[in-house]
Image (cartoon, rainbow, N blue to C red):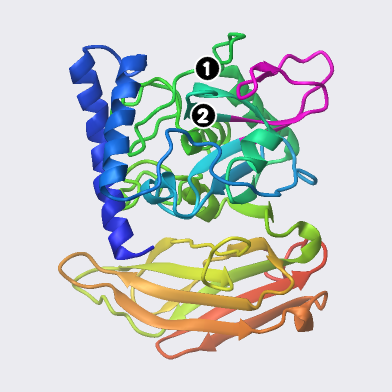
Amino acid sequence: MTRGKLSAICLILLFSASLMFVGTTITGTSMTDVETFDDEDNQVEDFAKENQIEYTPTFANDGMNSLNYNGLVPGDIIVLGTAGTFFDYLIPGEFSHTEIFCGFVQSGQYIWDRDNHEWMAASTPYVIHSTKSDNAGNGLGYSTWLTGVNEHADTAVALRVSGVNNAQRQQAVDWCKSKLAGGTDGNPVGPNYDWGWTSKQIDSTNRLSGVDGWYCSELAWAAYKDLFGIDLDPDGNSWSWTTAYGISPSDLYEDSNTYVITTSDWSAEDCYYVEINLVGVYYETDSDPWPKGAGEMYMKWYVGDGWGGSGYVTKSFHGITKRNGRGYIYWKKTMASVLIPKTHPLKINVQAWEDDSWPDRDDQFPAFNYWSDSMLDFVNTGWWWWYYLDVGSCRYCIEFSISTSPIGTSPNGL
């Protein structure tokens, strides 16, 4: 993300938050009133025109993709985005909307199609999501896979939450469904859309917007957080310059608790299973010696081609631990357990940092970098690893495996 876009996003987030309060003050009513949203739409549209940004007052109909639901299970998360649109500009990261796959309509089920205003036929694949649309209503409801996913954005990626089984993923779907308020007109069908993007809550009124509902990525985060204690926000409860205390669709994509199942550009058949683990780091230099105390060590890393974009797999994890002086830190962390397209190069980048408090600057250790133009040399050949490779002031122990099938436990128990 460019610095210009980042700065604009920060300003727009503040602008959006101010609109919430302006709407409440002007109308003297709650944010659930139609008057308030109409007024907000006008102000946002004016802002978009002044900044020459493409804008339509809906999260839908922003592009087409061919993401397939084959191989997905209920509870998988879909993130979507279209470059160059207003919400791409407004929402940090590559993605601007989130949906949860519900599976297929069962015989005897009544699932209301919010977009076409009719009951879905049996065997129809569908999603649940919170959105705001003149046609589809304001808040939580159901869309068919075709309308909600394929006719929604140019780019679509299916994510799966690790650490839970399929029955638990179904529980996440049931959690979302339990929040629907009912109604057969489909407009609206559930709790109102929450405009408080800079904050998040599991099941209460957003203190910024005054809405007792969810925005799209907040819904997926809340379900897994409430049921299983899994935090899909890589920032946790910490402040972020891109989302403040909220959670964006790209946060879900980047979190270490999710992994990519398929994208609109490629499917599992086009990919290799790749797992990369950081076993440990040996620090030869204590950059934060006594009397300052123990240094906080943290990691930065990415895999895939290293640049991101549609069909690419990149992740970042910032783990923090402490130790006094030089020596080993056994991280034992799976940095990546993902699918990477067979045609893509493999790049591994790991870097240790020492987190110093102000006014000292963080101390940067030498990075571990590995690049292979072809993953074919490593496919189905077991585990490869570097045993505390010396890169200067620290040594890295890293292992990886590439396979045509899901990968089991590593030699180091990861």
Amino acid of disc 2:
Ser
Q: Residue at x 52, y 35 (%)?
A: 225
Would you name the residue on which mark 1 appears? Answer: 190
The reply to whether residue 210 is in sight is no
- Mark 1 and mark 2 in contact (Cβ < 8 Å)? yes
For label 2, the SS is strand
Q: Residue at x 59, y 77 (%)?
A: 347
Amino acid of disc 1:
Gly
Would you name the residue on which mark 2 appears? Answer: 130
Residue 95 lies in the magenta stretch: no
Figure quadrant of residue 332: bottom right
> Is residue 1 depicted above or below 401 in this figure?
above
Q: Position of residue 136 (x, y in %)?
A: 55, 24
152 relative position to 58: left or right: right
Q: Position of residue 163 (x, y in %)?
A: 65, 46
User: Which range is magenta?
Assistant: 100-128
For label 1, the SS is loop
Q: Nearer the viewer, residue 35 or 193?
A: 35
Q: Nearer the viewer, residue 318 or 135?
A: 135
